[in-house]
Amino acid sequence: HAKHEGRGRAEMYSAALALEAADRADLERDLMLALQRDEFILEFQAQIDVANGSAVAAEALVRWAHPDRDLVMPGSFVPVAEESGVIVALGDWVMDRVCETAARWAAMGITQRIAINISTRELSQADFFLRLRHAIATHQTPPTMLELEISESLAMEMEPRILEQLAALRRDGVRVAMDDFGTGYSNLSRLKELPVDRVKIDRSLVRDITTSAEARTICSAVVGLIQGLGLEVVVEGIESEAQMDMLRVIGCTQFQGYHLARPTGEQAYLDRFGGLLDSAEPDAKGRVLFLRQPD
Ligand code: C2E
Ligand code: MG
Ligand code: MG
Ligand code: MG
């Protein structure tokens, strides 16, 4: 019975954006309950630099592990959490978990950063940076272990106050990435004024590069511009070797995508990427170790 109801709920959540106000209120309440019941989990997805064969960062991605349903993905609840303000409490939970995890990894000798997604609603809270610094202090997290991913549309319209706070965090060693680049109103000339270290090129920009010369040209120009400004490029949503080969020709070396690694729980992540620092040597086929799929 619970299973059946569970499926119904899952469908409801997947259509969350189209919900009537009453259903949204239900979802908001369920999200708050889920927080109290500790039903959220983090998965981690590797960002790999193929120039030296190592994972440079893990992106933390939130999921809702409801007892009666399949894992609920953030696309189904983050938008509602943002609109209702629940994202502030959820974001605090994510921040705390990431700071704790990053401190633990650092103590294990792991130097990979953990990247955390920050929504508009969170960043516009007056005390956002205070709360982040509190989480860092609580867990004694090395700031160099952290990266903030801020979406392009948000990054382009940041107030001076937020820009200053981000710049201060960067001086302490926290990295800042512009997420989903290529999906918003890309104001390329504004890029050099923003306190960012790296730019994550959205999947939509690279989806067709193996079949469309036009897509290739656009991608190559965008990558050249970002690199020309002295920023790192990470390409998201790599689903094939052919895509990656083409992007390497264009000059990219940092990739994230299902082709390299899907998001997984912490232990599975560490089993695959936690010990790579000394062992990023090519195998018999000349591929670096991380490209070997688990048996
Ligand atoms: P994002 O930050 O752009 O994260 C990348 C999304 O693309 C993730 O989806 C990831 O699983 C997916 N992805 C990675 N590689 C591939 C690929 O090769 N192909 C395809 N088709 N997809 C790929 P996910 O985990 O469902 O997250 C969706 C979005 O939800 C994220 O987009 C982010 O904006 C938001 N989100 C996730 N976790 C958090 C969080 O803790 N806080 C906040 N505020 N937002 C979050
Ligand atoms: Mg992201
Ligand atoms: Mg993204
Ligand atoms: Mg996205």
Image (cartoon, rainbow, N blue to C red):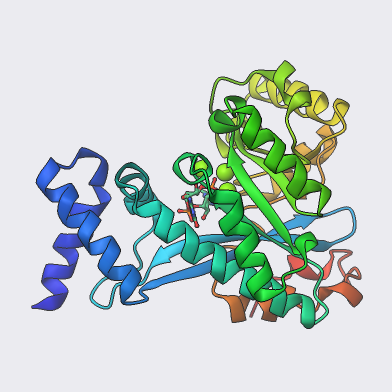
In the displayed structure image, the side of residue 176 where residue 119 appears, left or right: left
Whether residue 47 is situated above or below residue 200 in the rendered picture: below
Residue occupying the point 91% across, 70% down: 281
In the displayed structure image, the side of residue 129 where residue 107 appears, left or right: right
Residue 104 quadrant: bottom right
In the displayed structure image, the side of residue 75 where residue 60 appears, left or right: right
Residue 9: in sight, yes or no? yes
Whether residue 49 is situated above or below residue 153 in the rendered picture: below
- Give how far across and how far down residue 190 sits, in percent: 71, 20
For the N terminus, the quadrant is bottom left
Residue occupying the point 12% across, 71% down: 4
Residue 243: in sight, yes or no? no
For the C terminus, the quadrant is bottom right
Return the residue nearer the eye: 221 or 94: 94
- Give how far across and how far down residue 162 sits, in percent: 63, 36
Residue 283 quadrant: bottom right
Residue occupying the point 48% across, 46% down: 122
Return the residue nearer the eye: 119 or 66: 119
- Give how far across and how far down residue 96 sits, in percent: 55, 68
- Give how far across and how far down residue 98 sits, in percent: 60, 67
In the displayed structure image, the side of residue 161 where residue 83 appears, left or right: left
Residue occupying the point 73% across, 45% down: 244
Mark count: 0
